[in-house]
Image (cartoon, rainbow, N blue to C red):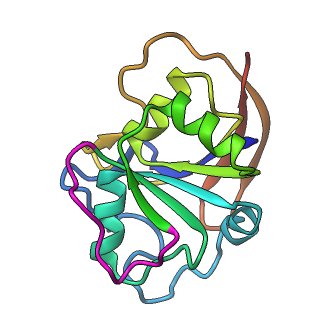
């Protein structure tokens, strides 16, 4: 089973403002000014399972339409009681350790999991369960916010696979953790 991180960060390393807002991301205004998808749709076409942290899930709910269709989505939380009935039946709420969840998904036949949310990403990285990181740097400094990488349990060495530069100024780098 493959696990991937696909995330955008400001040039100063934040994935969201302190309040979780993503208004600095290209296309976040909804005006359609940025029509490039930066490989996101191709990436998502390869994913059968999405693993989200609670805060990422809550931001998605504020943004409106559920972006994952009928794909299996696991929301990790120790505090949420339940999910709204409006979500597809393929969305589930769990309180699980990354290793336990990884083993369960692998045994259930999952092929490619997308891990999203700062704390969730760090948990999977700390457990050595991430196969690739696709990080898109947005050319903006927001000064403060939720960091992409906060404290981790140990150094994680990465191999650079490739970097793509887009006309918009975004730079997307692909890495593979060394095991």
Locate residue 168: give its quadrant. Answer: bottom right
> Residue at (35%, 42%) from the top-left corner?
95
Note whether residue 13 is visible.
no
Q: Is residue 6 left or right of residue 83?
A: right
Choose between 5 and 108: the one closer to the eye: 108
Task: Give the percent coordinates (x, y) of residue 20.
Answer: 25, 56
> Residue at (43%, 39%) from the top-left corner?
120
Note whether residue 147 is visible.
yes
Task: Give the percent coordinates (x, y) of residue 59.
Answer: 31, 65
Q: Residue furthest bottom?
A: 31
Tell me the magenta residue range. 78-90
> Residue at (47%, 78%) from the top-left corner?
88
Q: How many marks?
A: 0
Locate residue 25: give its quadrant. Answer: bottom left
> Residue at (41%, 37%) from the top-left corner?
96
Q: Is residue 14 left or right of residue 41?
A: left
- Quarter of the image with the C terminus in it: top right
């Amino acid at each position: 089973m493959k696990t991937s991180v696909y995330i955008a960060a400001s040039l100063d390393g934040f994935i969201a403002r302190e309040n979780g807002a993503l208004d600095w991301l290209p296309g976040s205004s909804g005006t359609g000014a940025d029509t490039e998808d930066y490989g996101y749709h191709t990436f998502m076409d390869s994913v059968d399972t999405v693993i989200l942290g609670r805060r990422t899930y809550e931001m998605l709910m504020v943004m409106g339409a559920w972006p994952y269709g009928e794909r299996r989505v696991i929301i990790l939380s120790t505090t949420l009681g339940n999910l709204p009935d409006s979500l597809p039946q393929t969305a589930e709420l769990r309180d699980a350790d990354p290793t336990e969840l990884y083993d369960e998904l692998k045994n259930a036949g999952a092929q490619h999991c997308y891990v999203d949310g700062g704390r969730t990403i760090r948990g999977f990285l700390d457990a050595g369960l991430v196969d690739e990181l696709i990080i898109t740097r947005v050319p903006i400094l927001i000064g403060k916010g939720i960091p992409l990488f906060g404290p981790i349990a140990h150094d994680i060495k990465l191999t650079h696979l490739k970097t793509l530069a887009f006309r918009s100024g975004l730079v997307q780098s692909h890495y593979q953790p060394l095991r």
